[in-house]
Amino acid sequence: MRRLHRIGAVAAAAMLAVMIVPVSMAAVDNGAKWTFAIYLDADNNLESYGLTDLAELEAVGSVDGVNIVVLMDTYTAITGTHWYAVDGPNEPHIVLDDDGEYQNNCDCGIIAGGCPGELNMADPLVLEEFCEIVCSKYPAEKYALILWDHGGGWRGLCWDDTTFEVDEVDDCITMVELRDALVDAKDQTKVVFDVVGFDLCLMAMPEVAYQVRGCADFVVFSEETVPGAGFPYDAIAGHLVAEPTMDGGALASVIVQDYAAYYSSTSGYVDWTISAFNMTYMDAMKNAVADLGVALLAGLREYMNSIQRDLITAQEYYYPYNVDLKGFAMNLQADPIITDEAIKTAAKAVQEVVEAGVSDFVNGIHNYKSYGMAIYAPSTNDGMHSIKDTYVEVPFAVETGWYDFALAFSSFYGRTWGVGDR
C-alpha cells in the first residue's frame, strides 16, 4: 500500500485555470522567515489530489516573510514537471526558469544542457537538487520540506508512473537514497531543515526517521495510511503565514493539529494517525531499540509465544507487520509470563524514548492505541509473517540489530499462533 485515496477525484481542468508567467530564478532575498517547499510527486493516480493541494497553497500564497515553492510532476494534466512559486490568492502560478523563459520544466542540474518535459521524481538526484535550489534561490531563516506521494514506510517513497511506463522499472526513493539525497543537499547548502514532513502513507517509523538524522530538527508523519487528500495545506500555510516567527517545533505541531482537525471533522475518516518526532531523540531511540532487539533475541526461545502475543495485541496498521512501538513495549512490561529483567528494562527504555521524542500526536478512533511511532515486526499468521528480503537493506534495522531479531522471530519454527497461547 502506498497512499490511500478514498474521496472523489477533483476535476483536473478546474485546477489548471491559471496563467503561467515566466520569471527569473534569481535568488529571492526578501528577509524571509520561512521557505515552505513541497516535493509534489503526483505522477500517478494521486494526480487530482496534487492539483487540489496546489490550489490550497495558492489560496494562501507566499507573503513577505514566507516563501512557498513547489516542484510538481503530474501524470496527464500538464506535460512534464514544473517548478511553481505560489504567489497568493487570485494570482497566477509562476513557472520558474533560469533563463527567464518558459521551457515547460524546472531548473535542475541533473538535466544540464536541456530541459526535457519529464523528470523522474523517484530519482534521488532530483530530490537532492530540489533541496539545493530551494535553499539557494529562496534563502530564509527556517526551512520546511514536504515529501508528497505514495509511501510504503521503510520500503520507500515517491513512485513515478510515467518513468515506469517508459522504462518498465518500478522505481522509488529507497531509505538509502533518501539519506543520500538529504545529506548531499546539506553538504552543499549547510542547511538543516527545521521540519521534514512526509505526506505519504505509513512513514512514522524509526527506520524512516533515522534516515533524516542530522538533516532535520523535526519530522511529521503517519503510522497509518494517509487519505488521498493528504495534509490540509490551506490550513497549514495559513497558520504559517499568520505567524511566521514560529519555530520548527511549532510548525510540526501545527501540521499535526491541522491534520487532526481536518480528518476528525470530515465524515468517514476513522483510520488515521499523525505525529511529530523531535530528532534530538534519534540516538536515544536507536540505542533503546538496539537493546530491546538484543534482549528479545536472547529470550526468544523461552518467550516466543509471549512476544508474539504482545505484538499482536499492540496497534497494527494497514500492513499488520507495522506495530506501534510504544504499545509493544508497554505490553512486554505488563506481560506476567516474561520475567527476564533485560527485556523489561529495555522495553521501559523504548517506552520512555517514544514518550520523550514524539512531541505531538493525534489519532482517529480506530487507531486509539497509537503513540506516534511504529516499527517493522512480521508477527501475524495472515501470510505476512515472512520477513521481507529488502529489510536487510534498511540501515536502522541492520545498525541496531533489530533485523536479527525480526529475522529470527519471523522464521522461528516453534511459534504457536493465537493470542491465547502461552
Image (spheres, helix red, strand yellow):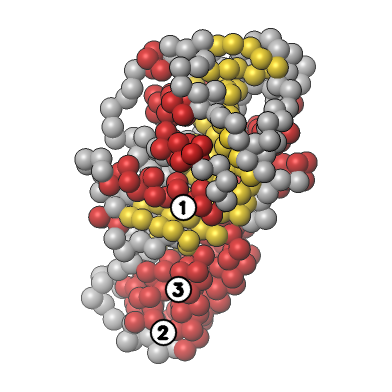
Asked if residue 4 is positioned above or below residue 308 in the image, the reply reads above
Q: Which mark is residue 351?
A: 3
Give neighbour class at mark 1: few <14, some 14-19, many 20+ (Cα, 10 Å): some
Residue at 56% in and 29% down: 63
Element type at marker 1? helix
Between tags 3 and 1, which lies in front?
Answer: 1
Which kind of residue does numbered mark 2 sit on? Glu
Q: On the image, numbered disc 2 is attached to which residue?
A: 302
Among numbered discs 2 and 3, the one appearing first in the sequence: 2
> Image height check: is 208 above or below 161?
below
Q: Position of residue 167 (x, y in %)?
A: 58, 24
Residue 244 at least partly seen:
yes
Q: Answer with left or right where residue 111 lies relative to residue 356.
A: right
Which of the 4 image quarters holds residue 44? top left
In the depicted structure, whether residue 91 falls above or below residue 388 = above
Q: What secondary structure is found at the residue carrying circle 3?
A: helix
Tell which tag, 1 or 2, sits nearer the viewer. Answer: 1
- Name the residue nearer the viewer: 8 or 342: 8
Of residues 355 and 415, the one nearer the viewer is 355
Residue at the location (43% across, 26% down)?
59
Give percent across and percent down for residue 412: 43, 71
**Residue at the disc numbered 1:** 253
Foreground: disc 2 or disc 3:
3
Circle 2 sits in a helix, a strand or a loop, which is it?
helix
| Image x and y of residue 199, in percent | 46, 41
Circle 2 crowding by C-alpha within 10 Å: few under 14, some 14–19, many from 20: few
Q: Residue at 33% across / 67% down in the picture?
A: 314
**Residue type at mark 1?**
Ser
The residues bearing labels 2 and 3 have C-alpha atoms spaced at a distance of 23 Å
| Disc on res. 317 | none
